[in-house]
Each structure stands twice: as C-alpha cells, then as structure tokens.
Image: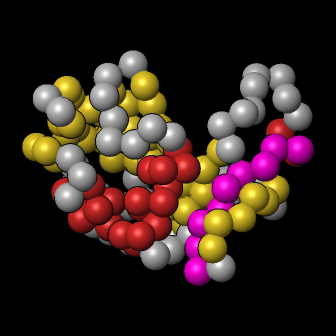
C-alpha cells in the first residue's frame, strides 16, 4: 500500500473532485462540504484507491488530502502537489519526503507551491 499526502490552503467545495476526475477512474467523492471529513474511492490502472480529506490541518486553513492504494498516478507527494496546483492554482504544500519519526518538527521543511513558484519553507 502506498500513500500520498498534500495540504491544500482554503479549499473550495468541489475542487478536489474536479481535479481528480481527470486523473482517476470511477471517482466517488462528495467534497461539496469542505468543513467536515470526506472519504471516497476511485480506481487507477484497475486498482482501487481510498481518498480522504481532513479539514483543519495546520491551523484551520489547510485541508489534508490523502490518497492510498497499490498503484497511484504520481510517484511522490511533490508530483501530486504539482498536479493539484495546476488544477486549483491555490497554495499547496507537501513534505520534502525525508522527515523521519523523531526528527524535530520545528526544523521540518515543506514544499510550498503557489503563484511565486516552488519553494522549500518552514511551515510557519
């Protein structure tokens, strides 16, 4: 099982399903209410995926999007974030991918994708 996780700032209702419709097959996701947890499913290359949206991540303005499955359309959180940014054009964040349990969170860097480009930043 693989998973990808990105964080979407000020998520608009329906934005995730509009983006994923062009990326996945058999998408079943009701993201019309982005103030509560939403769960859905889809398929990619015949494999089933689980999709979860968790609002209120990192100070309320971000929604965590988690995609889980045996085969995913992107190889990294950053590739997924780039695709989401092209579709939504808002701020998207994701981990650099090298954080390990026990590392100090305050030193953790993230990718931030927005109108200024791609930058590595400390979350706050």
Where is residue 48 shown, x and y percent of the image? 20, 28
* Boundaries of the magenta span: 107-115
Where is residue 120 shown, x and y percent of the image? 75, 58
Compared to residue 33, the image places residue 42 above or below, namely: above
Residue nearest the viewer, comparing 51 with 110: 110
Q: Quadrant of residue 107?
A: top right
- Identify the residue shown where x is 32% and y is 42%: 73
Most extreme residue toward the left is 26
Residue nearest the viewer, comparing 3 with 12: 3
Left or right of 101? Residue 74 is left
Q: Is any atom of residue 46 visible in this view?
A: yes
- Identify the residue shown where x is 45% and y is 38%: 75
On whether residue 45 falls in the magenta region, the answer is no
Where is residue 113 shown, x and y percent of the image? 60, 66
Where is residue 110 shown, x and y percent of the image? 71, 52
- Identify the residue shown where x is 31% and y is 28%: 71
Residue nearest the viewer, comparing 115 with 31: 115
């Amino acid at each position: 099982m693989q998973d990808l996780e990105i964080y979407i700032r000020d998520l608009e209702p329906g934005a995730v399903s509009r983006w994923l419709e062009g990326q996945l097959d058999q998408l079943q996701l009701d993201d019309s209410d982005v103030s509560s947890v939403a769960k859905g499913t889809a398929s990619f290359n015949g494999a089933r995926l689980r999709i979860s949206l968790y609002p209120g991540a990192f100070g309320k303005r971000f929604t965590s999007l988690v995609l889980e499955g045996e085969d995913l359309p992107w190889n990294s959180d950053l590739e997924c974030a780039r695709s989401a940014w092209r579709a939504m054009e808002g701020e998207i964040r994701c981990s650099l991918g090298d954080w390990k349990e026990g590392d100090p969170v305050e030193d953790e860097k993230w990718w931030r994708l927005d109108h200024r480009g791609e930058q590595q930043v400390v979350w706050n």
